[in-house]
Amino acid sequence: MPHKRNPVACAAILNRRPAYAGADGDASTPANSSSMSGRWAAGRRSGETLPELITLVGGALAQSEALVRDMQVFPQKMRADLDITHGLIMAEAVTLALAEFIGKAEAHHHIEALCRQALDRHCPLVDLLAADPQVSQYLSRERLTTLLDPATATGSAERFVRQVLARYQEQRDES
């Protein structure tokens, strides 16, 4: 990772991922999956899993703190990199919005075809979407522009940040 400023910290964080994450070692495997619950129960009986998890998480948090503390963010460069795709990176948002009107499968196939056209013609996806009768019947150009804007794709991030800040404030008030 020569383009990264601190590849060692990133690798250290990832390497602290517990082997108990799931049957395939995937940390995204839900904790309530059958493979996870079996391993967790076995580990709890032996008394080894929880201390190991705490140690691994603590190490990952320490590396994350150092990584974030020294992080440099260049929003203009990030935006320019996202704009290289001419909206294709956000096509899923349009698919989901259109699916409300024509169904998920049809929306998927239709937007996929328009994405291929945008790539072949080297043109912005929003132009093809706005000109397409099936899309424009349900979604205005303004709505399409909003859907294709990566800045609007924050998901649940705002809610998570509010929860963390509220919890932090509660803990400060308690001490």
Image (cartoon, helix red, strand yellow):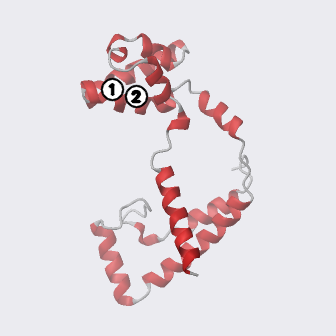
Residue lying at the far left in this picture: please name it.
103
Amino acid type for the residue under numbered disc 2: Val
- At horizontal 38% and vertical 12% (from top left) the residue drawn is 132
For numbered disc 1, what is the local secondary structure? Answer: helix
Assign the C terminus to one quadrant of the image: bottom right
As drawn, 100 above or below 161: above
Q: Which of 172/119 is in front?
A: 172
Residue 89 shows which numbered tag? none
Dot 2 falls on a residue whose secondary structure is helix
**Dot 1, how many residues are within 10 Å of its Cα: few (below 14), some (14-19), or many (20+)?**
many
* Residue nearest the observer in this picture, 155 or 158: 158
Query: For residue 98, which numbered disc appears in the image?
Result: 1
**Considering depth in this image, is 73 or 175 the residue closer to the camera?**
175
- Residue 109 lies in quadrant: top left
Q: Are marks 1 and 2 in contact (CB under 8 Å)?
A: yes
Residue 123 on image: x %, y %: 54, 15
As drawn, 144 above or below 43: above
The residue shown at (31%, 67%) is 32
Q: Residue at x 70, y 65 (%)?
A: 66
Q: CA distance from mark 1 to mark 2?
A: 6 Å
Q: Label 1 amino acid? A: Leu
Image quarter for residue 139? top left
| 35 on left or right of 90 | left
- Residue 94 circle label: 2
Q: Position of residue 112 (x, y in %)?
A: 38, 24
Q: Between residue 98 and residue 170, name the one nearer to us.
A: 170
